[in-house]
Image (tube, grey):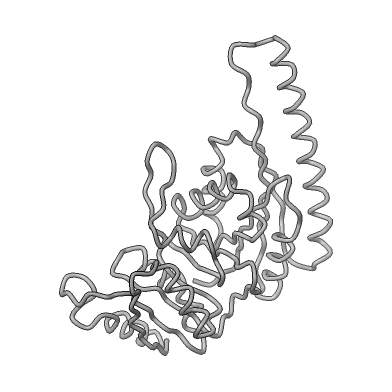
Amino acid sequence: MTFKTILAISSLDQGSADLLSAAALAERHGAHLKAMLVTFAPPPPVGDVGGIGYVAWGQNWQDDKQRLDERTATLRSELAATGASFDVEPVFCLRSSGAGEIARRAGFADVTLLGAELMLDVGLFRHAIDGALFQSPCPVILAARQTPLTLAPDRILVAWSPALEAGRAVRQAMDLLSKARSVLVALVDPQATRAGLGEQPGVDIAEYLARHGVKTTVDLLTSGGRDTGAVLRQHAVDIGAQLIVMGGYGHSRLRERIFGGVTQSMIDNPQIAVLLAH
């Protein structure tokens, strides 16, 4: 997949760093930036229609909407100065609708970029992951806090498993993989089974990538009891990878997204940019 439309998400109380970084990335790679500025409307009071609480809620609603409009105008001015192709869409919605609003827009983007500032806003970040990753066909890239992001990485680490999500991640990242100078497929504590990874773990995915012109090395890693996510992150640092490609695993329970262990580990501490697909 070629990334021609990048969706980036920010909140009313964040700075401009995430969106300016996304704009610079879009300009470098000839892509269009769709900037989504999200504000959650205060919920109306219960059982106080026409009362003092309802009047105060109405005033808060109007104040937040005005702040959103002002922030949108400021962002448009800042992004115009970058020279990138962009649009800014303000979204004022109830918190319960946040993931759905993000999912709808992610459905018309090639990738959703979640920046370091957004990750500090835990509430909006969870909605962004849930909407963009689990409710849309769009892959997500988590930007690392310490390293610059590129859509043309020289070295990529593929965190491989026999799961459906890992296969989708590889396919959605194929354009990046085929242009990379080096691609390493890593398997942590692989089990050689006919039904899972095969009798020679990593061989099948390496052959598949080779047919797409991707030069691949397979690394079989031993966790030694350590967290799998930590093992993958350390290996990515050791080999000088600029991007990790992996499946995003999770399921819904009581309307809250519960993430698989490796996915959660990567989300909590993305030392290197991570492309996730579900």
**Residue placed most toward the observer, 210 or 246:** 246
Task: Give coordinates of residue 197: x percent, y percent.
Answer: 24, 74
Residue 79 sits in quarter: bottom right
Task: Give coordinates of residue 142: x percent, y percent.
Answer: 56, 63
> Residue at image x 59%, y 75%?
151
Task: Give coordinates of residue 275: x percent, y percent.
Answer: 50, 67
The number of numbered discs placed on residues in the rendered structure image is 0
> Residue at image x 66%, y 29%?
42
Instruction: Give the position of the C terminus as an image quadrant.
Output: bottom left
On the rendered structure, is 253 left or right of 270?
Answer: left
Q: Would you place residue 173 above or below residue 112 in this image?
A: below
> Residue at image x 43%, y 67%?
229
Q: Would you place residue 131 above or below residue 47 in this image?
A: below
**Residue placed most toward the observer, 182 or 256:** 256
Task: Give coordinates of residue 137: x percent, y percent.
Answer: 45, 57
On the rendered structure, is 157 left or right of 253?
Answer: right
> Residue at image x 68%, y 55%?
35
Residue 270 sits in quarter: bottom right
Q: Would you place residue 64 above or below residue 207 in this image?
A: above
On the rendered structure, is 196 left or right of 151?
Answer: left
